[in-house]
Image (cartoon, rainbow, N blue to C red):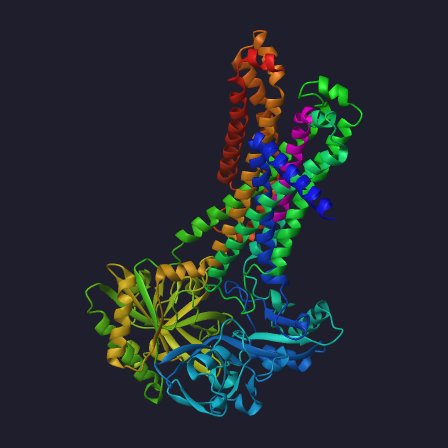
Amino acid sequence: MNTFRQNLWNDLRLDLRGALRSLRRSPGFTVTAVLSTMLGVGIATLTFGVHYAMVLRPLPLPDPDRLIAVSMVSSPGFGRSDLSYPDFLDFAAQNHSLAGQAVHFTGGSLTLLDHGRPERVAVEAVSPDLFQVLGVAPFLGRTFRPEEDRPGAPCTVILAHDLWQRRYGGDPAIVGRTIVADEAPCRVIGVMPRGFRFWINQDAWVPLFNRHEVVPVRLVRNLMMIARLRPGVSLAAAQADLRAIAGRNFTGRVQVIPLRRFSLFSYALRRMLPGSAWLILLIACANLLHLLLVRTGARRRELAIRAAFGAGPARIARHIATESVLLAGAGGGLGALAAAAALHAVEGLRAKASLPYWIRFEPGLAVALVALAATVAFALVLLLPAMLASLRELHPNLAAVLKSGAAAGQSRGQRTFRAALIVAEVAVSVVLLTGSLLMARSLFHLRGERGGIGTDRLSTAWLLLPGDRYADAGVRARWVEDLLTRLRTLPDVEAATVSDDIFSYLSGGQADLQTPDRSALPVHVFFNSVGSDYFSTLGTPLTSGRELTSAEVTAGAPLALVNQTLASRLWPAGNALGQTVWLQRGALRDRFTVIGVAADIRHQRLRLRPTPSLYIPFRYGLRRRAGIMLRTSGNPRTLLPEVERWAHAADPRVPVFYTATLEELREVSILPDRLSTQSALLVGAAAFLLSLVGVYGVLSYTVSLQLREIGIRLALGARRGEVMRRIVGRGVVLGILGIALGLAGAVALGRRLSPLLYGVAPTDPFSYAVVAFIVLDTVFVACYLPARRVLEVDPVDVLRKE
């Protein structure tokens, strides 16, 4: 047994040394094969890692496949919306497909004032049945009761496990204790299990009606609905059931999707990237097959010599297998490491996106198994064709192979097949490169979109005015205006204002607007409570009229400004100034006189068109949060500490949070577009690099096999320029054919990408021309370099060697 093991080990060492020597003698083939395998394995692993995290990873909830999210198609310009409270009541009372349903509101917060320094924590306002629908029981205590979910009920709160550990030291007696939240007593009734942070990364949960203003108006849609399907009910049946209910109440079209897919904000990450990854894998496999066909013909003599010296088919097969394992192992290992690094980079961006807590871009066991499977697949691609072709050619024709040149056996069918592979690789790379360039140009246009805000030097911060002393709206308005007056005295401050909404937070309100004569249908508007100098601070011009003054803001004068979209909707003749409108917000109905018309501001995502908007004095705001905005003459980041210092000087108990510059807010708002574009660029660059490597490597091997033919032509008087044109021309013709086919495919891809594009057409001629020019130049260089290297060889030396 020991002798057998020793012989086996010696054979493996000999095979390994022989394979390494063989690969060192063919550096072009080795580098091309390793690079192709690395890109193929890396893209496949990265794609699966993203897809697994966002789609395939099981939710950490009982029976997760029965959980669904329900949303409504919104009014034009508002994007996808959630549900109104009347919608939820209809669905809960009339459905036949749901075993339970609940709603929640994302975006709330609490300021904890006990146990150390004040801390601002994110909270979710939920209906009492939410935890039962999810199937999650508290780690300590209980969940909310129906009587606790009503306006005026005593404050109750459920803590996340991390907050319980961090702030309260994991005290098991926390249940039943009263803590101080927003300067009011709040009783802790439970602690959720470790790791549970539903919906995004909340630190606590409060009853919906107790802590959030629920407006009983159908057009005010700000609640997210989660439901659990009854046993045996399909997703399609539930959607049909809820759509029938919505149709009876004229509320719009319902969307019912699995809960795991509700947060997929990026179409490219979910659909385009996996499809593109398959194309990358096909290009990588085509590269390897192409190289192996050429290399098999080039090494026929080498393998024949091995056979002549007694190497049997098993020994030759083992030699080829060792080479394949080395190439696949090196490429697969590098690809897996690159994919792991990319997943860590995506995980770093995840904190800026509104993704559910269960999504983690981590290289776990499933991702590692995919990397291993892809590496094995590439090893087989390297192994089987080479082994079969080599053994088939050597078995009957050993003597003929030894007498022939290295280039023997290059049949017309093989040349045609290789040419078709080159055309296909170039075509696929053109398709993916064009899609990548379209999305890159779209992102460029989106970055240049100012959204109606005429300045970049803007500092923003949120304040919270808690406690009974700020219960009166007039007190809040006067306190904020006094703070703005102080902030305007700072050296670098050019203007300052306050608002219920800061760009990208969308914290203003939605309501119905009606003219007194009811000459038009009610308009669903975005309304924003603002301070004095609001539009001048943002650099947004007024097309007519004037802004609110500080006295009008603090006094709550019934005055308002409208944007151009709303003005053209209600008063097409352009006579908006002096008009009266009624704003309906649930049970509240206020009358305002229009004193100005402002240019459109995109308060939501930059790519969404402006919505009808109404701007009213800050005193009419219902929230205790105040968004402070300062226009500066210098770096806006340097002023953010000053906002906190002056606010605390006025009242130390007022927390300042979510400080950011306008540019930082813009980056957050376009994060989905940036991730989509980066994904597309990654895939396009990988496809282009693979095609370049494939074209160069194959042509390099093909030209090297024509050394004897080229030497004879040169010896007979052929000019080097003619031979160069002949070699390069063949490759360029194949490249042009591939570019033509690729541009046709890019048109189809551009149409599919049209929902993701901004400011660029799916058939943008500039993008198509740039890609065609780059690919054609690259193909020319890939053909020229190996041809020039071969033509630099002395033909006499070539003929003497042959």
Relative to 785, residue 768 above or below: below
Quadrant where the C terminus lies? Answer: top right
Which of the pair 556/237 is nearer the observer?
Answer: 237
Name, please, the residue furthest toward the right.
Answer: 396
Left or right position of 653 against 226: left
Left or right position of 634 against 656: left
Residue occupying the point 44% across, 81% down: 589
Instruction: Give x and y (percent) for residue 265.
Output: 54, 61
Which of the pair 340/241 is nearer the observer?
Answer: 340
Which of the pair 99/252 is nearer the observer?
Answer: 99
Q: Is residue 100 magenta?
A: no
Residue occupying the point 66% across, 37% down: 15
Relative to 705, residue 289 above or below: below
Q: Count the marks.
A: 0
Left or right position of 743 against 239: left
Quadrant housing residue 117: bottom left
Instruction: Give x and y (percent) for residue 81.
Output: 54, 68
Q: Is residue 286 visible?
A: no
Q: Is residue 227 visible?
A: yes
Residue occupying the point 63% across, 49% down: 275
Instruction: Give x and y (percent) for residue 738.
Output: 61, 33
Instruction: Give x and y (percent) for residue 533.
Output: 28, 68
Relative to 419, residue 635 above or below: below
User: Which residues, given as a range, are shown in magenta?
Assistant: 277-302
What secondary structure prevails in the magenta region? helix
Which of the pair 147/547 is nearer the observer?
Answer: 147
Quadrant housing residue 783: top right
Quadrant housing residue 36: top right
